[in-house]
Image (cartoon, rainbow, N blue to C red):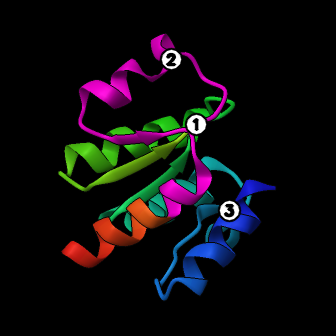
Amino acid sequence: MHLVIETADLLAMGLDVFSPYHDVGIGSAEDVVEKDLEGVRDCDALFAIGDGLDSGTIYEIGYARALNKPVVYYAENESDQDNKMMEGSGCRITDDYVSAIYQTVWEAMVL
């Protein structure tokens, strides 16, 4: 459910948004992985929802950071232990949704 909200909120803030869930969809690894990674390569900043520790999201975060892309990591329910890789790799971490949206806009606009 967060994906629908976050996409609409980021669009409302004037950003072009690529959402793996909406723009690629669900399918086999052959169908989705390269399209998803292309979206990460092409982005200016990555907004990631960490609650639930989805393996795809975690991978996208690492991939974006390896490409030196800024990442805003929004997680309300994860522990410091669960978030340590995001913290240690320089992600902007917040547990406040509105702050996460504004930080994402800022990161995208700074570039």
Residues 61 and 76: in front is 76
Q: Split into 4 quadrants, where in the image is the N terminus?
A: bottom right
Horizontal side of 24 relative to 93 (left or right) equals right
Residue 44 lies, in percent from the top left, at 29, 70
Q: Which mark, residue 40?
A: none
Seen at 68% across and 51% down, the residue is 28
Marks 3 and 1 sit apart, C-alpha to C-alpha, by 18 Å
Instruction: Assign a secondary structure to mark 2.
Output: helix
Residues 92 and 98: in front is 98
Amino acid carrying mark 3 in the image: Tyr
Instruction: Assign a secondary structure to mark 1.
Output: loop
Pointer 1 residue: 75
Upstream in the sequence, badge 1 or badge 2?
Answer: 1
Q: Range of the magenta residues?
A: 75-101
Pointer 3 residue: 21
Amino acid carrying mark 1 in the image: Ala
Residue 93 lies, in percent from the top left, at 41, 39
Residue 90 lies, in percent from the top left, at 24, 37
